[in-house]
Image (spheres, rainbow, N blue to C red):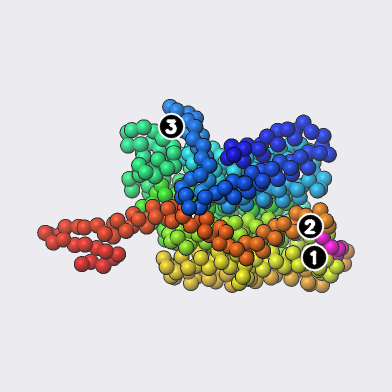
Amino acid sequence: MINALLWVPLAFGVVGLFLPKRLVGWFATAGAVVTLVIAVIMAFGFDNGQGGLQDTVHTMWISGLGVEYSLGIDGLNLFLVLLTAVLWIAGIALAAFRDTERPRTFFFLMLAAETATLGSFLSQDLLLFVLFFDLMLVPFYFLFGSWGVDRTAEGGPTAAQATLKMMIYTLIGSLLMLVGAIATAIVSAHGGHLTFSIEAIEHQGLPLGSQRWIFWFFAAAFLVKMPAFLVHGWMPDAYRAAPLPVLVVFSGVLAKVGAYGFLRVVVPLFPQATAQFQTVILLVALASILYGSVMAFTQTNVRLIAGYSSVAQLGFITAGIFALRADGADGAILQMVNHGLVVAPLFVIIAILFERTGTEDLRSMGGMALRAPVLAALFLIVALATLAMPGSANFIGEFYILNGLFDSKIVFAIIAISGVAMSAYYALRLYIGTMHNRKPDGVASREISLRDGVILAPLVLCILGLALYPQLILHRADPSVQKSVAAVTGNQTAEEEAVASTDGETVVTIRGVSK
């Protein structure tokens, strides 16, 4: 079943290359739907009480290097896989309902990107994870560069220039991660059998000196992918250039691969370095929250408002992970899903607004709700979820994250709260500016079409459903989160309870108190 989940999108993409152009979009959508059905079946069969990986596949791939074709599902990736399957339907359907140039190649690349993304979430071998992590870049390189929007008339870059900038940032991070993965396997082997199995490496352990520098190789790759403050320079140009159907999945899913990598790879494999560099990463997370929030409410391009809001939200997710508390990491996983379910319909709405106004400038929009109450209502739910209105799943996710931060670093938690207030401003500014301001001349206000409603309504229903029952994710994620975080907290406890002999006197330090 897990092999089918991984390879079905690519199989549909290959078959679609030989279909008539008028059918390939619908066939690609069917492939995404089949992938979701498989993911849902696996989710229903998931046994939360079992613990550990389920539906595993372990096959030796390159025996001389100890590389395995190893896949599995647990609480860390179960709902990220479901999120991927859901959002890919939305992105592909959005393109299928519209005229797309060279549709066979476009939908093949979209489905190939889905397989690569699922591979990143499912991989349990470190080198296989790096391989899929890098392969994700290839389809998006062509999707951004060939179907992207040139911004030269606005003084911006061409689609090719924006894509090249994105690739330079992400490839440097990916190459660093490849070096880190090879070094991790060699150092952890201790002269014995070489393996890239994440579980085996965690069991073997690495010395602190090696953990320190390898930690930053992985952290660089993941922070660029998210993107985080200081390494986000590729994001503005790439978001403005990207085709909107592609941006639905790129912003909704790919940023989460970086955050997931911290939980799957960095925290369990480099626990001592994680504890040592906790404060540094939290500073990056706080900077992302504040910078992303400020930039989001100063932008006038609606794409960039959504893009910078994503920087802020990924900052919250990073803070939850590096609180190094189970509550924080639980909230981070919930918030990964929440953000994907919010930002994807946001970009669908941006596509609808562009078709009605002919612009992406917030200052030239307004009055969309005049004859479109259904569109306005759907957008309102998305906006309220974005600002983490009490009662929404986003509120629960941020509450868990802040609770973990308060237990770990109270000063960081107090500063992070300001990001919650700022998100209310930029979310409401975007909604009011498009829906309720004075309608400019020449702007068409009309109700959402059935084809767009079919895409948007299920995403909004997912937002509402998760608001009613966030425990669906929290309950299933918690055992895996506890195990991942315990790699750090257990190590800290062992150090705190160590017995040291000084000048003949035994000193026992328990949780920072000498006795």
For the residues labelled 1 and 3, the Cα–Cα distance comes to 55 Å
Tell me if residue 361 is in the magenta stretch.
no
Mark 2 or 1, nearer chain start = 1
Q: Nearer the viewer, residue 489 or 443?
A: 489
Q: Which amino acid does label 2 sit on?
A: Gly
Report the residue marked by disc 3.
66
Residue at the far left in the pictured view:
504
Q: In this view, does 44 lie to the left or right of 413?
A: right
Q: Which amino acid does label 1 sit on?
A: Val
State the CA–CA distance, disc 2 to disc 1: 9 Å
Q: How crowded is mark 1: few (under 14 residues within 10 Å), some or many (20 or more)?
A: some
Q: In this rendering, does residue 42 appear at all? A: yes
Q: Where is residue 212 in the image (x, y as percent from the top left)?
A: 38, 49
Callout 1–callout 3 Cβ contact below 8 Å: no
Q: Whole-Å distance between the Cαs marked 2 and 3?
A: 49 Å
Within 10 angstroms of label 2, few (less than 14), some, or many (20 or more) residues?
some
Image quadrant of residue 154? bottom right
Question: Residue 374 has which mark?
Answer: 1
Residue 220 is situated, as x and y percent measured from the top left of the image, at: 49, 49
Residue 329 against residue 204 in the figure, above or below? below
Q: Nearer the viewer, residue 14 or 148?
A: 14
Q: Point out residue 387 in the picture as x, y percentages from the top left corner.
A: 63, 68
**Residue 370, percent from left and from top:** 84, 70
- Location of the N terminus by quadrant is top right
Residue drawn at the location 67% of the way across and 46% of the way down: 37
Q: Mark 2 points at which residue?
A: 453
Q: What stretch is highlighted in magenta?
A: 443-448
Q: In which quarter of the image is residue 352?
A: bottom right
Kindly identify the residue that appears in the image at 43 percent across and 30 percent down: 65
Question: In the rendered structure, which disc, 1 or 3, sits on the residue that comes first in sequence?
Answer: 3
Q: Are marks 2 and 1 in contact (CB under 8 Å)?
A: yes
